[in-house]
Image (cartoon, rainbow, N blue to C red):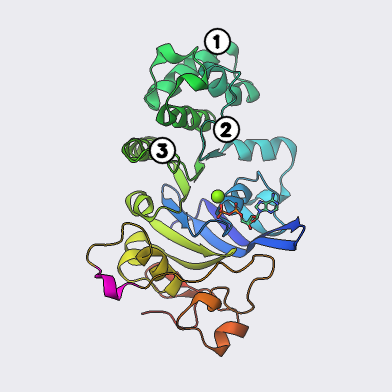
Amino acid sequence: MMEPLLRVEHLAKYFRSNAGQVKAVDDVSFNLYPGETLALVGESGCGKSTLGRLVIRLLEPSKGKIFMDGVDLSGLKGRELRKMRSRMQMVFQDPFSSLDPHFTVGEIIAEPLRNAGVPKEEQQKQVLSLMERVGLPGEHYFRYPHQFSGGQRQRIGIARALATNPKLIVCDEPVSALDVSIQAQILNLLRKLQKESHLTFLFISHDLAVVRYISDRICVMFLGQLCEICPTQDAYEHPLHPYTRMLIDSAPDPDPDVSGENRMLLQGELPSPVNPPAGCRFCTRCPYATEECKTVRPEMKDYGNGRFCACHHPLA
Ligand SMILES: Nc1ncnc2c1ncn2[C@@H]1O[C@H](COP(=O)(O)OP(=O)(O)O)[C@@H](O)[C@H]1O
Ligand SMILES: [Mg+2]
């Protein structure tokens, strides 16, 4: 059995809001293995971005632990923490707002190198090599972000994320803001870079077509908790959790093999994360919900072959 690169245990993040405490992430555990792409899927507001930010420690967890290469990140301080952090980077959805408009591309990509104390002459060399790796012409070194298209800006964001030679990259909806034709180019670039550098991706997306294309495994998230973890193909072909099935069947471009009348469509509103249902959080929207579902939180159970599901009435 391969050792995980990252082990997430009982992770939680609670925010204060006017309406009360928002349990954005609430007791989430999973492993991330070296070189894999693990997709994190779920409806808007279910806590994907919060979980992604927790994982690379842009946010402090309210509860729980994260281990990288077996090292407990919560125990690290100062130089050790900075070193570990440089091994984890993030690529954001909107490359425009995440790139400072006042700096040239060269300066933007060089920033993490500067922070790491790389000498100036060396910085330029490395930036040019990073630009080449992500498919940006070197002569664009002195251009500003607004002079680039959306796809090229995402290449800049990816180059900057690669600068510190990370092991793990959290990609938060990295192609959602791009035209479909450009999406494929960026996804293929990510795959190429993954192969070249043995990168591990936590790939956050609400787009199930993208997820099917890019990921090895899927984590399905609902209202701050995980419902199912499984190999990507299993999620599409025989999901265990009713929510996984409904999420896939409700996607705009569903599997053509599934005829219309057999589809299970998502219904009802997302319950409030301030006051989530007791028991299974999905119970108010689930056609199979029983009394037990309303009162007892289902545990994440191991169904073998890498399939895990938290449901009192799994589909298979
Ligand atoms: N800084 C914050 N303060 C208060 N609430 C937040 C904050 N960030 C996120 N939330 C809330 O946490 C929940 C999960 O948000 P988010 O992680 O952005 O979900 P997703 O990325 O799946 O759309 C939402 O209810 C959101 O309003
Ligand atoms: Mg988000």
**SS for dot 2:** loop
Q: CA distance from mark 2 to mark 1?
A: 26 Å
Q: Quadrant of residue 304?
A: bottom left
Q: Quadrant of residue 179?
A: top left
Q: Is residue 13 above or below residue 89?
A: below
**SS for dot 3:** loop
How many neighbours does mark 1 have within 10 angstroms: few (below 14), some (14-19), or many (20 or more)?
few
Q: Sequence order check: which comes first, mark 2 or mark 1?
A: 2
Q: Which mark is on residue 30? A: none
**Residue under circle 2?**
98
Residue 216 in the image: state x and y as whole percent: 37, 54
**Residue under circle 1?**
121
Residue 113 in the image: state x and y as whole percent: 58, 23
Give the quadrant of the C terminus. Answer: bottom left
- Label 2 with label 3: CB-CB less than 8 Å: no
Look at the image and give the residue range highlighted in magenta: 258-263
